Image: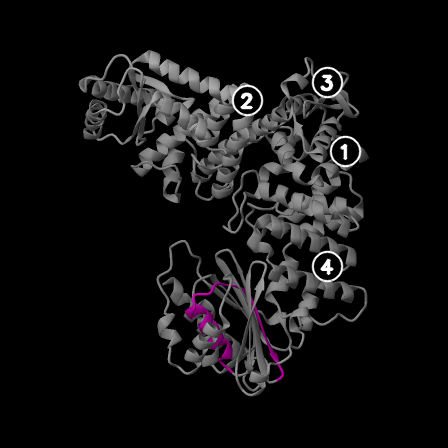
Amino acid sequence: MTAADRAARTEDADALCAGAYEAAGGPGTGAALVAVGGYGRGELAPYSDLDVVLVADDAQVDVDGEDWAELAGQVWYPIWDSGAKLDHSVRSLPQMLEAADADVRVASGLLDVRHVAGDPNLTLRLRTAVLASWRRRARERLPELRELVRSRHRLVGELAHLSVPDLKEAEGGLRDATVLRSLTTSWLVDVSAADLERGRLQLLDLRDVLHGAAGRATDRIGPEHWATIAEALELDDERAAQRQVRELGRRLTHLSRLAWRRTDDALRRTPAAKPRRPELEHLAPGVALSQGEVVLERNARPASDPTLLLRAAAEAAVRDVVLAPPTAARLARESPPLPVPWPDEARRQLVRLLTAGPGLLAVWETLEETGALTAILPEWDRIRLLPHASVIHRFTVDRHSVETCMEAAALIREVSRPDVLAVAALLHDIGKGSLTEHSVAGAPIARTVAERMGFDDDAVALVELLVRRHLLLAEVATTRDPDDPATLDALTAHVTTPEALALLTALTEADARATSPKAWSTWRAGLIHDLSRRAAASLKGESPPPAAQLGDLDLPETVREGGVSIQVDAVRDGSRITVVATDRVGLLADVAAMLALRRIGVRAARVWSQGEYGVSVWDVVEEHLDPGLLRDQLDNVLARRVDPSARLAPRAATGAELAPTVVVRPEASDQATVVEVRAADRLGVLYLVCSTLAGLDISVRSAHVSTLGPQAVDVFYVQEASAGALSETRAAEAAHAVRQAVSRLTT
């Protein structure tokens, strides 16, 4: 599929539409059939609609008359009969111009209007009027268009990072390419025409291949289409095809963001304020600001200043302005390699860049697109455009790492070594894509990079530790009993100083915030900070304070009288349900059944015993829950008026789900047997596990439920009903029974 194929399809469509117009007796003056949208641009894909408008000069044609309505029908029917998909409308010339004035989307779309049949002078008048209005009102219309673009980006996401890329609507897709053409048409801002056209044509080629693979009109690349796309692009495998599509999306995203930054700058300036010659504002040695972009001073000598690239990038990021791409490209070409180890200034400028906050992203993208990043961090290519295995991640690994730096920038005042935090944030996932665990693979790479950057031995060791252990705090906090002495030991055995713990806490928060909102809920934040607080006390030789989640509750009178208490509290991202009742084997299963039967999504949970009472606290997605309805549901379960095992019977799993795992963790506690269950987050999983354990007369002393994306990690501290950890035989029996129960979900 090439531009020639699209031109041939457009030519055939033109012949069809023009023939229909002529056969219907369409007049040669005063009326015209015009193409708009993708058809107007000559970009028809194999299954594209034909977007056409029958337009009339109401001074020459009675647009309200029966003859005009009859003519329209006579034009459309032959096109429908041909099997073509038609998106049509009938308008007078004033109506077209009024619609363009009223809706910026219509105005932008009419910039591509093209004559097909009828009066060419009418089409020319329409096009001229639309272009003149667009340019005259650009300062008024472009902010409106900008908001529409932002809204679409928020809704759809970025082409470079979507698991199912949308070639048209995603940021960096065809819609953005069209918007960029509208920006340049306004004459307020310029976009690299060659780069834009190259990317746009490649996207159009991809869409043509996608239509052929799907056999229908679609802009979304499903998993089943990658093999065909790889073959059409003459690439080795599907992964190479995905990388090429992401690369293309990122390049157009970069062009789009750069164009909008320049548009914003142009809109802030009045025409009279525009200087005849660019004025340079000195920022740093060799670096200046010109019209909102960081450039080189006239006397700058990149060939003799290896730190100039980092200095220019840091100045742009700190000020949240554009690093001019020609400047970055020149620095990439002319700057000598940094000496090893780096000089102090180079390291300082890198830290300034990484801790700049929101200004980092655009500058980092410019460094990537111009090839300048290779000179700074050649290891970056390991994770460049690499997708995460988990769908909870919003971005590819490289972009996630940059987002982590941006989140860490807000936390640098909480640590003693902000430079170490910044570099660890950048490198924490550098081992992704390896055959071994990425934190293990990434640690020696991070050490090598930190040594090359000239960090002292202590800082190098800290960077290596943070990369190696960046998952540890979150894993221990969310899957282990905070009141068990072994839990603190699991953390402090590897993180042995308060300084390292503070850095790890900040990195854990930044990493989670950069992953997705779900990864840093109030619940997870509380668990992580509570464990960090207790570990810090332990490392200082102090007695750890009690775990925040396990403080004694004031027992309601209904519970003291043998009843059940259910309390619902609103939290920032859902609700928190607290259930208290006399403890017994099977209580947790009944509460889990209550929630599952009400189809309440559990994000996290903590369960413990308080004397003779069982307490469970559930962090759930739903808001505005009625405690009375929950109590009625639990009463039905307790009275066995409802059979949860029948109502929550497993359903067939999707082929994409991983098989569940059930593991006994003997190192996790000396006081109980720890059973860890990892499975797809599906309705009834928690109930199945708890009811299976209850059926074996095994008591759940505490439980720690965590859901992240499609994966549920449930950890149960279990004991015999008569107290005491399970024997090896009983532990194996329990694990086998639970494994069989949850495996029914994937059969």
Residue type at numbered disc 3: Glu
Q: Residue 528's x, y, as percent?
A: 66, 61
Q: Residues within 10 Å of mark 2 (few under 14, many from 20)?
A: some
Q: Is residue 362 left or right of residue 142?
A: right
The earlier-in-sequence mark between 1 and 3 is 3
Kindly report the distance in space between the C-alpha atoms of the residues bearing marks 2 and 1.
32 Å
Mark 4 sits on what residue? 495
The earlier-in-sequence mark between 2 and 3 is 2
- Foreground mark, 2 or 1, reads 2
Q: Is residue 2 visible?
A: no
Q: Residues within 10 Å of mark 1 (few under 14, many from 20)?
A: many
Mark 3 sits on what residue? 279
- Foreground mark, 4 or 2, reads 2
The earlier-in-sequence mark between 4 and 3 is 3
Residue at the spot x=63%, y=83% of the render?
611
Q: Quadrant of the N terminus?
A: top left
Residue type at numbered disc 1: Ala
- Foreground mark, 4 or 3, reads 3
Q: Compared with residue 135, is residue 483 higher up or lower down, i.e. above or below? A: below
Q: Which mark is residue 346?
A: 1
Q: Residue 298's x, y, as percent?
A: 75, 16
Mark 2 sits on what residue? 191
State how many labels appear. 4
Q: Residues within 10 Å of mark 4 (few under 14, many from 20)?
A: many
Q: Is residue 571 left or right of residue 679?
A: right
Q: Compared with residue 269, is residue 738 higher up or lower down, i.e. above or below? A: below
